[in-house]
Amino acid sequence: ADIQPGDKIYAVNMNKCLVMYQIGKKPMKDGMNILGAHIDSPRIDVKQNPLYEDSNIAYLDTHYYGGVKKYQWVAIPLALHGVVVKKDGTTVEVNVGDNEDDPVFFISDLLIHLAGEQMDKKASKVIEGEAMDLIIGNIPVKDKDKDAVTAGVLKILKDTYDFEEEDFLSAELEIVPAGKAREAGLDRSMILAYGQDDRVCAYTSARAVLEVGGTITDRTACCILVDKEEIGSVGATGMQSRFFENMTAELMELMGEYSELNLRRCLTNSAMLSSDVSAGYDPAYASCFEKKNSAFLGNGMVFNKFTGSRGKSGSNDANAEYVAHIRDIMDSSDVVFQTAELGKVDVGGGGTIAYIMALYGMNVIDCGVAVLNMHAPWEATSKADVYETMRGYVAFLEKASF
Ligand code: MN
Ligand code: MN
């Protein structure tokens, strides 16, 4: 194939992850500048045998996905998104709850009047995972004494989407907070929205690769958006999959540059920003942060030299030489940035996809946008931080040469 500097090439993996390249002037073996983010978010998944009825209420049984405070997900409007794939291979898309006139769904919580015992429980036990079942119907069909409400629900599913109960077996249905992203604050300074971990970094990364479309970069610019980060980057669509490596090999083959050694050189000579959200300093929970090394909403793009927990366990720790190079790029591009770690030592911690890409021997640093209420149904960010982060990503793609 005739591939020229400036060309844009992308590949999709199982409709769940994406890698985008804009070809640079230098050979691939000199390395790429890579932005990587994840596009899955904590949520509640529908089980494979989900439908049941109790006391005139039809339910979908669920299994939550990722790290959630379960008590935050009850008694709020929820939407249902996903696919049902039938045996003949046809895919039915389901999106209910996010249009103004759509119905929504909910998980019930016990009324405060009877909650004396519940209120004494540990927060992790207040709502049990197995009790997080989604309420989806209440009208029984006529002349049926058993499962009359689920019969009505199944009729609606058949009429609207043309699938049967057994098709839930091959469905991926995800329950998420219903409603659009909103401006927050009288000064409209912030965004309150579901799933900003990590779409606030994924969107800006994808935009950054498109922004550099105006210029042809020295090194190939790459953006990788992956699935399954919230459950450990596992599986064929998570960062641990060989998809990214395989697609890079395919691209080099198309460019006439492929050899096993050239691929290894490309990966090890690349530089990466692992784009993920960071914990925003929360004055209401000040004791969980160390103020000198915290990220503040409104103070710009956040760099985390290292992540991990309890003695940096599970961390990616960026080399000082690479951090110096990144500082120089951000300063010379007038990008407002701050540095932080995820909370006070020994309080907790977390990880990203950074350590997986670092296995290739490339330089990787974590960076992104500070978030309040991370992993809650509604997460908050500062608009100014989102803007600076995108500028930082563009500067990195244009200037990194490490
Ligand atoms: Mn994340
Ligand atoms: Mn997360």
Image (spheres, rainbow, N blue to C red):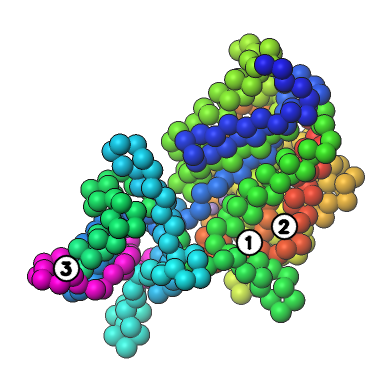
First-in-chain label (1 vs 2) = 1
Residue 387 is situated, as x and y percent measured from the top left of the image, at 76, 56
Residue 164 in view here:
yes
Q: Could you give the CA–CA distance between mark 3 and mark 2, rounded to whole angstroms?
A: 49 Å
First-in-chain label (3 vs 2) = 3
Q: Which mark is residue 386?
A: 2
SS at mark 1 in the image: strand
Q: Is mark 1 within 8 Å of ligand 1?
A: no
- 42 left or right, relative to 145: right
Q: Is residue 145 magenta?
A: yes
Residue 236 is situated, as x and y percent measured from the top left of the image, at 45, 33
Residue 399 is situated, as x and y percent measured from the top left of the image, at 83, 36
Above-or-below relation of 231 to 262: below
Q: Amino acid at mark 3?
A: Ala
Which of the image's four quarters has the C terminus?
Answer: top right
SS at mark 2 in the image: helix
Q: Is residue 113 magenta?
A: no
Which residue is the site of mark 1? 371
Viewer-proximal residue, 386 or 52? 52
Magenta extent? 122-148
Q: Nearer the viewer, mark 1 or mark 3?
A: 3
Are the residues flagged by discs 1 and 3 in contact, CB closer than 8 Å?
Answer: no
Which residue is the site of mark 3? 148
- 83 left or right, relative to 224: left
Viewer-proximal residue, 204 or 364? 204
Residue at point 63%, 40% (across, down): 36
